[in-house]
Image (spheres, rainbow, N blue to C red):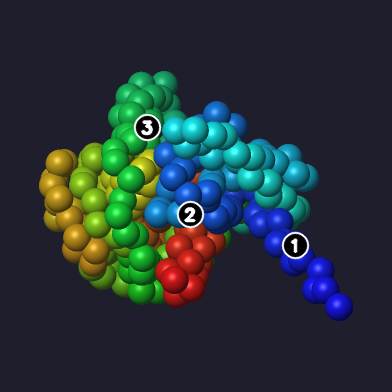
């Protein structure tokens, strides 16, 4: 009797998550929705925007001689609501003068998010930047003082004021500043379009263009900006798309253990 050839299962992911795809040898570039994706050796870590439709999708893997379509499936995920009360109403409904500052800060942050430095040689293992309790998950549909706002673009980790915040991976400091909503903030370029943003710090210990290693102390936990208590907000951006940091960690570290 002859064994039937095995059919590999199509990888799956959720809106706001990532999916790992094995790449053909000699792949030089990987694209999803015409956006270049993070590539680690023979794997692509594909960012799935929150607005992605449920169903079948393809990633384009390019080499010098060929182009290959790699299928994956996006399955449904329901994100919960979160209702928060902020005492300073100005942090919910900014004044006109505040909006000028907010727009200028947003431009700086978007420029940092748009960086695409060389692909990192190694990311794993990635760990949470601070030990604590995750009090607000990625994708929460948030309401401040009863008013709807954009889905939560990262995770919030509650920790004591002054707790050291460490870099989850090597990189270079792309931006630091004190911002209206985010308070004391650091953006780290880890390479290949992977950018970390760490917010609400009480103290910043690094400066732009500084090279850092995994577990380098970046700053200290605080409650600056729009915060209801001491915590760290950590966003993971892949090529400008915010994804769930917890899913990202699981995928990166699981693929490392399988090598």
Q: Which residue ends up furthest to the bottom in the rendered image?
A: 1
For the residues carrying marks 3 and 2, which lies nearer the camera in this image? 2
Q: Residue at x 59, y 49 (%)?
A: 16
Evaluate whether residue 111 shows in this view: yes
Q: Secondary structure at mark 2?
A: strand
Left or right: 62 as drawn, with respect to 104: right
Location of mark 3 (residue): 114
Q: Is residue 33 left or right of residue 190?
A: right
- Horizontal side of 246 relative to 140 (left or right) equals left
Badge 2: residue crowd in 10 Å (few <14, some 14–19, many ≥20) = some
Ranked by sequence position, the earlier of labels 2 and 1 is 1
Q: CA distance from mark 1 to mark 3?
A: 38 Å
Specify whether residue 31 is in view: no
Q: Nearer the viewer, mark 2 or mark 1?
A: 1
**In the foreground, 39 or 101:** 39
Nearer to us in this view, 1 or 178:
1
For mark 2, what is the residue? 43
Mark drawn on residue 25: none
Question: Which residue is labeled 1 in the image?
Answer: 7
Percent of width and height locating residue 183: 31, 46
The C terminus appears in which quarter of the rendering? bottom left
Residue at 86%, 78% in the rendered image: 1
Looking at the rendered structure, the secondary structure element under dot 1 is: loop
Mark 2 and mark 1 in contact? Answer it, CB < 8 Å: no
The x and y percentages for residue 217 are: 19, 63
N-terminal-most mark, 1 or 3: 1
State which quadrant residue 34 falls in. top right
Q: Which residue is pictured at 70% across the width and 41% down the height?
A: 57
Q: Nearer the viewer, mark 1 or mark 3?
A: 1
* x then y, percent, for residue 157: 42, 65
Mark 2–mark 1 distance (CA, rounded to whole Å):
19 Å
Q: CA distance from mark 3 to mark 2?
A: 22 Å
């Amino acid at each position: 009797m002859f064994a039937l050839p095995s059919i590999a299962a199509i990888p799956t992911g959720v809106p706001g998550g990532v999916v790992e795809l094995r790449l053909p040898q000699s792949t030089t570039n990987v694209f999803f929705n015409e956006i270049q994706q993070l590539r680690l050796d023979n794997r692509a870590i594909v960012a799935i925007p929150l607005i992605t439709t449920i169903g079948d999708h393809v990633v384009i893997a390019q080499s010098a001689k060929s182009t290959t379509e790699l299928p994956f499936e996006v399955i449904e995920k329901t994100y919960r609501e979160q209702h928060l009360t902020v005492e300073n109403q100005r942090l919910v409904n900014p004044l006109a003068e505040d909006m000028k500052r907010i727009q200028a800060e947003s431009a700086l942050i978007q420029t940092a998010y748009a960086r695409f430095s060389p692909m990192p040689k190694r990311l794993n293992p990635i760990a949470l930047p601070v030990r604590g309790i995750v009090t607000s998950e990625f994708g929460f549909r948030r309401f401040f003082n009863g008013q709807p706002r954009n889905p939560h673009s990262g995770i919030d980790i509650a920790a004591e004021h002054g707790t050291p915040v460490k870099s989850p991976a090597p990189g270079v400091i792309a931006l630091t500043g004190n911002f209206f909503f985010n308070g004391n903030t650091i953006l780290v370029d880890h390479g290949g379009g992977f950018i970390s943003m760490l917010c609400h710090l009480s103290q910043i210990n690094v400066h732009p263009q500084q090279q850092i290693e995994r577990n380098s102390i970046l700053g200290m936990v605080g409650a600056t900006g729009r915060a209801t208590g001491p915590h760290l907000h950590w966003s993971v951006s892949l090529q400008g798309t915010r994804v769930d940091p917890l899913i990202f960690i699981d995928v990166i570290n699981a693929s490392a253990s399988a090598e």
